[in-house]
Amino acid sequence: MGLERMKGNRNLAGLDDNILIDLALLEKNQKAWTELVGRYYGKVASTVYRIIGKSAEAEDVVQEVFTEMARAIKTYRKDSLFSTFLYRIAVNTAYRYIQRNLDRGETAEEPEFFLQIGDKSAGSESSMIKQERAKMLNGAMKKISPEKRLVLTLYEVEEVPLKEIAVILKQPLQTVWSRINQAKKELYEILNGSMLWYPSST
């Protein structure tokens, strides 16, 4: 189905990402652009919040991600998933924010990193216990390096495949896997076996 036919198709929600990109760039279709942004806005916001925390500036960082996407989308070669391309921008933008804050000596509000991980092994636990577990994990996450926190957030919370994380971060697969395992080990040592949570098997 060609672009001209797609141009008149109102069901943009059912179109492939790459078709939406072509419509947005080649046909200047604003609705296609809006659909593309809306499709990933929640995921990008979730990723940014979990990396930098729900600070007053977090929404500005999310907006910065999509501004950067608009500038860089012409370089997207479609040899990888668009989600990978966008995740890379989101991660790099959030990481730049972290570095700016570190340079200023500031810290973000506590991110909600591991509520899902707490839930994975807590099917029969009360909501209060789950929240307490999540709070303990959040505190432990703040004590590991931003680089390790980043890969662990992507892998365990966002459930981004290992190979995709390597592409996003432009790092060797083994480096990413090693960093994830180091992060898990450090977390467990910080928690010191105080919770019924263990790093997933490797």
Image (cartoon, rainbow, N blue to C red):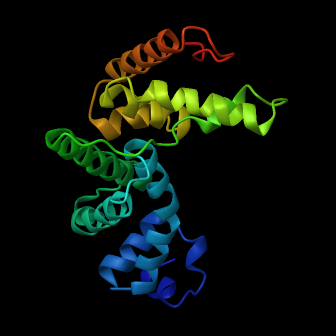
Query: From the viewer's perspective, is 165 left or right of 98?
Result: right
Above or below 198: residue 147? below
Q: Does 63 appear above or below 90?
A: below
Q: Residue furthest left?
A: 103
Residue 55 quadrant: bottom left
**How many numbered badges does the structure rendering display?**
0
Could you tell whether 94 is left or right of 191 in the image? left
Q: Is residue 45 above or below residue 33?
A: above
The quarter of the image holding the C terminus is top right
Residue at 52 percent of width and 66 percent of height? 39
Q: Quadrant of residue 174?
A: top left
Q: Is residue 109 left or right of residue 93?
A: right
Residue found at x 54% / y 8%: 192
> x%, y% of residue 31?
46, 84
Towards the viewer: 172 or 63: 63
Question: What residue occupies the far bottom of the structure in this picture?
Answer: 8
| Image x and y of residue 127, in percent | 77, 39
- Above/below status of 46 relative to 133: below
The one of 115 and 38 positioned closer to us in this rendering? 115
Q: Position of residue 5 (x, y in %)?
A: 50, 86
* Residue in the image at 40% along x and 77% along y: 33
In this view of the protein, which residue sits in the foreground, 118 or 19?
Answer: 118
Residue drawn at x 73%, y 25% is 121
Residue 152, image x, y percentages: 45, 29
Residue situated in front as seen by the camera: 54 or 40: 54
